[in-house]
Image (tube, rainbow, N blue to C red):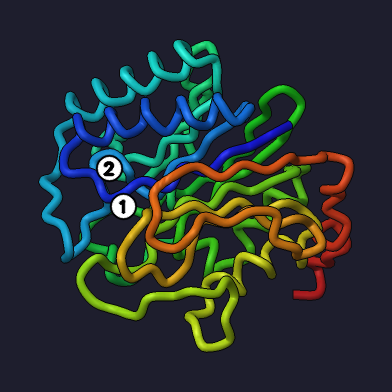
Amino acid sequence: MKIALASPIFPTSISNGLHTTAKLVTEAVMQGAEIVCFPETFIPGYPLADHPVPKATPEELQNALARVCEIAKEHAITIIMPMDWYEGDQFLNVAHVISSDGKVLGYQSKNQLDPSEDEVWHAGTKRNLFEVNGLKFGITICHEGFRYPESVRWAARNGAHVVFHPHLTGSDVTGKQLTTWGDPASPYYEKAMMMRAMENTIYFASVGYAMKYQEATSSIIAPDGSVLAYQPYGEAGVITAEIDPDQATGKLAKRFKPELY
């Protein structure tokens, strides 16, 4: 199966984000992808100091999700769409999974919030596994995938071939412009992507925004830690890679002995 990561610029509004979604989904389909994943809270946009993001209403988010479902059905592709979301009295950071026939299969919540996010979202409490056309996958969101490797190991130990990792790292205002993937002088994020794949013997697909001063770029990593594809720094677009489930054995993850800890 071919998977895709869509790296957009930061959305100016929900309608702008949906317009960009349709554009990048079209690119992913043209490249032969069956699944495409977008960055963290792409709808309505991560609440950065760089970009003012008004808190969306439940109705606005429901309508946006309905439009993403239409896009998935129109293009016959599975979409992983990270969004803000209301669940009862909780306000969550989630990633919805929408099937190629436009049905919502469920969502993964962000369960390990960064300390700076404690006043923004409620922390989720459940981990979920999804399956599309025989490919099993989990989702871990930004901080929890970078700093809580248990979130990826759970998916690998439960049969995931790949874990998708929507994130945001960097700024459009200040920072350092990276030029080389995994540079020793760059932040640790890309090294963490490599480790999440190697330590679990699965694929790891990490996707972020195209920003002027990125601290990491969208990358697809193989079970042996090799980089299959990455998006050029600062450029919006779509990358794809072939996923071979037989290579994603989860061998190292399944050898973990939780009783020792």
Q: Determine which residue is flagged by label 2.
A: 90
* On-image quarter of the N terminus: top right
Seen from this angle, which residue lies furthest bottom? Answer: 185
How crowded pointer 2 is (Cα within 10 Å; few <14, some 14-19, many 20+) is rated as: few
Q: Is residue 147 left or right of residue 13?
A: right
- How many labels were placed on the picture? 2
Q: Earlier in the sequence, mark 2 or mark 1?
A: 2
Nearer to us in this view, 60 or 75: 75
Proximity of marks 2 and 1: CB atoms separated by less than 8 Å: yes
Q: Is residue 152 left or right of residue 1?
A: left
Nearer to us in this view, 114 or 180: 180
**Residue at 73% across, 43% down:** 160
Residue at disc 1, secondary structure: loop
**Residue at 35% across, 80% down:** 176
Residue at disc 2, secondary structure: strand
**Residue at 23% across, 44% down:** 11
Query: In the displayed structure, would residue 106 be above or below residue 175?
Result: above
**Residue at 48% across, 74% down:** 179
Query: In the displayed structure, would residue 109 be above or below residue 28?
Result: below
| Position of residue 29 measured from the top left corner of the image (x, y, whole percent) | 55, 25
| Position of residue 261 measured from the top left corner of the image (x, y, whole percent) | 74, 75
Residue 122 numbered tag: 1
How crowded pointer 1 is (Cα within 10 Å; few <14, some 14-19, many 20+) is rated as: some
- Between the C-alphas of marks 2 and 1, the distance is 6 Å
Quarter assignment of residue 49: bottom left
| Position of residue 90 measured from the top left corner of the image (x, y, whole percent) | 27, 42
Q: Which amino acid type is shown beneath numbered disc 2? A: Gln
